[in-house]
Amino acid sequence: VAIALALKMDNIEVVYSDSMAALRAFAKGTVCEQTLKILQGKNITHHLLSWFPTHLGQINDSPPNLNEAAHEAARELSNRASPGMRSTGEGDNREILTTYNELTKHFYLSRRIFPPPHKNLTRPQTLTLRLLQTRMYPTLKMLHIMYPDLYPSNLCPHCGEIASLEHMLWQCTKFAHLSHITSARWEAAIRSSSLADQLWAVHQAREAAEELGISVPTWELPATQ
């Protein structure tokens, strides 16, 4: 509605708004009925709608920021009316999420623990990385439970311990002389967004699977960067 009122003014060509949702509504032609009534008979083809950040604070050596002053006054009135409520600080500056896509994206990104696979990874490498991140990478321990006829033993052929994922990747005694292969190194690699780190994890897992005779025919051999 505020945008519509501004568009009615003959001396204004550019209308600024801090509401991305309102600007999208005008772009798609899905404004509310009240807005349509305000603009009825008005030619707005020569106007430009532009988004403006909600709150930039007071910039040095510039005229008073009236938008910021109005926001501060409204916040003081709100706090006065509800003494138990406090300003959320940084959260006040966030654009309100309105669309389904914005809401779902916000929630799934806030819950994400691991970074996405690097764009230069191949599809098989991406699958391998995701299996490592979710701790679902095939091991003798897992395959022995699922396919006991094909994998009659869950023991590591190198040391005789149960070949769990941790054992296969860094706990086996065969890694004792390799100081760079540790739990911390693995955890950092699968939580890293770096192509080099992700490739390192993919390559190490592939080599470990091959040494234990774990069949992974759909995953290609380690690639280069």
Image (spheres, helix red, strand yellow):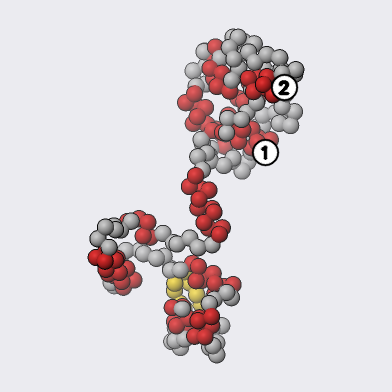
Q: Position of residue 164 (x, y in %)?
A: 59, 20
Q: Is residue 85 above or below residue 137?
A: below
Q: Quadrant of residue 219?
A: top right
Which residue does the numbered mark 2 point to in the structure image? 147
Residue name at image x 29 percent, y 58 percent: 85
Q: Position of residue 185 (x, y in %)?
A: 49, 26
Q: Does residue 28 appear left or right of residue 188 in this picture?
A: right
Residue name at image x 27 percent, y 63 percent: 82
Give the residue furthest to the top. Answer: 159
Residue 122, disc = 1
Residue 162, disc = none
Q: Position of residue 86 (x, y in %)?
A: 29, 57
Q: CA distance from mark 1 to mark 2?
A: 28 Å
Residue name at image x 44 percent, y 74 percent: 16
Cβ–Cβ under 8 Å for marks 1 and 2:
no
Observer-nearest residue: 27 or 58? Answer: 27
Instruction: Inspect the image, locate mark 1, and give the three-letter code of the amino acid beneath it.
Output: Thr
Q: Quadrant of residue 46?
A: bottom right
Residue name at image x 47 percent, y 86 percent: 8
Q: Is residue 44 above or below residue 189?
A: below
Observer-nearest residue: 61 or 72? Answer: 72
Q: How many marks?
A: 2
Could you tell me which secondary element the residue under label 2 belongs to?
loop
Instruction: Inspect the image, locate mark 2, and give the three-letter code of the amino acid beneath it.
Output: Tyr
